[in-house]
Structure formats: structure tokens, C-alpha cells
Amino acid sequence: MVITVKFVGAFRSISGKSKFTLKLVNIVSLREVVRKIVEELPKLKRVLIDLELEDPRPNTLILVNGKEVSVLNGLDTVLKDGDDVVFVPVVHGG
């Protein structure tokens, strides 16, 4: 199974990649894909994952095949062969 992962904005700069493919043996959830990404690209962990929550969503808009994951099944969304996952940084201000 192959998943295409794309990075936008600061994630692209930090990872040094605009996109890459993950080859996976089993059907996996988005949560597992996020873990795999930070294993393969450890520079992203500090900006992608909220360390207190251990969750990427406060810092990131995540799209699976063009749909925001909150309208799917969140991090428990099961990915299929050929899916596209896009990570867009969210900037907070006050």
C-alpha cells in the first residue's frame, strides 16, 4: 500500500520535502502514518506534534483526499492504497 504525503508552508521548509511516499504493509490509521512520518523525518516532530497533547491537530490542518480529518474519523481515519495526506501548518496568534 502506498500513501502520498504532502507538506505545505513551514512543514515543507523544515522537512526539506514537498511530498514523499510511504510504503506500508498493512492498512493503517492516520495516527500511525503521523508516527511513521516523525520517525522518518524527526525534524518535523517538534513543529508537527503538540507535545502536551501528543497530537498534531492543534498545530496542523490535515487533509485526506482533500477532506479535513474532522469530517472523517480524525486520527482514526483508516487510509487506503493511493490516498493523499496533506499537512498544512496552522498559525495561532493573539
Image (cartoon, rainbow, N blue to C red):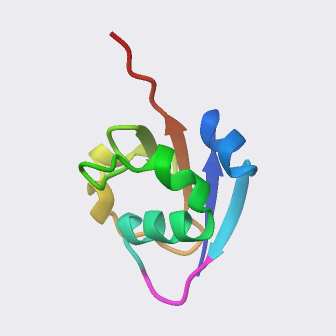
Name the spot of residue 75 as percent of width and height, x first: 31, 59
Residue at horizontal 58 percent and vertical 61 percent from the top: 42
Q: Is residue 25 magenta?
A: yes
Quadrant placement of the C terminus: top left
Q: In the visual, does 29 lie left or right of 45?
A: left
The relative height of residue 75 versus residue 93 in the rendered view (above or below) is below
Q: Quadrant of the N terminus?
A: bottom right
Q: Which residues are magenta?
A: 23-27
Q: Is residue 62 left or right of residue 18?
A: left
**Residue at 33% in and 63% down:** 77
Picture layout, residue 85 above or below residue 22? above
Residue furthest out toward the top? 94
Query: What residue appears at the point 28 percent right and 54 percent down from the top-left corner?
Result: 74
Which of 68/53 is in front?
53
The x, y position of residue 79, in whole percent, is: 44, 69
Q: Identify the main secondary structure in magenta.
A: loop
Camera-nearest residue between 9 and 28? 9
